[in-house]
Image (cartoon, rainbow, N blue to C red):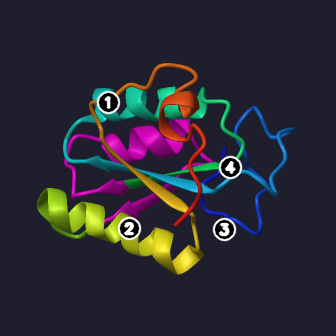
Amino acid sequence: MRSDSSPENEPGLAAGEQVSRARTPSVLAVVLSWNGRDDTVACIESLLAQDYPRLHVLLVDNASQDGTVEAVRQQFPGVEIQVNETNLLYAGGMNVGMERARQEGFDYVLLLNNDIVLPSPARRMCFNGQTPM
């Protein structure tokens, strides 16, 4: 799954892309990390295992020094990464991701700490009958 595509241009969708895109809201999953390589990799793996058809992943890294960015680039070449020059802390890092979602026109933003591992499929928990705002 690639996350560098906008909702209108979706070459890298999750496994369930056969679902009607016209009725399915687009979601940007923002994973915030700071020196948590192994947790971040596990979190992204759980996101990529989801079957939600319009799920895009953005890693926002708060200037990690433990090889997080390099590990994600190597293991998940389709995942977009925003590397902050300094640690913007939780609010600052998440704001970077939310601004990206706003600029690119996503319907929803899913904010995740890097130590979260989603069950599969999590979409039933998140989008059961909801409409975009």
> CB of mark 1 within 8 Å of CB of mark 2?
no
Q: Residue flagged by tag 1: what amino acid is it?
A: Ile
Label 2 environment density (alpha carbons within 10 Å; few <14, some 14–19, many ≥20): many
- Left or right: residue 84 versus residue 101 is left
35 above or below 63?
above
Closest to the observer: 14 or 21? 21
At 72% across and 51% down in the image, what residue appears? Answer: 24
Q: Which residue is mark 3?
A: 6
Q: Position of residue 53 (x, y in %)?
A: 72, 42
Q: Amino acid at mark 3?
A: Ser
What's the mark number on residue 116?
1
Estimate how packed mark 1 is, as few (under 14), some (14 to 19) or many (20 or more) residues with alpha carbons within 10 Å: some
Spatial CA span between label 2 and label 3: 14 Å
Please, what secondary structure does the residue beneath circle 2 have?
helix
* In magenta segment, residue 75: yes
Residue 83 higher or lower than 30, as above or below: below
> Mark 2 or 3 closer to N-term?
3
Q: Which span of residues is magenta-colored?
A: 60-83
**Quadrant including the N terminus:** top right
Cα–Cα span, label 1 and label 2: 18 Å
The dot on residue 22 is none
> In terms of sequence position, does the residue under pointer 4 or pointer 1 come before the other?
4
Q: Position of residue 14 (x, y in %)?
A: 70, 38
Kindly identify which residue carries mark 2: 98
Calculate the distance from the C-alpha at mark 3 to the C-alpha at mark 1: 24 Å
| Residue 87, image x, y percentages | 14, 62
Q: Which mark is residue 54?
A: 4
Q: Is residue 108 visible?
A: yes
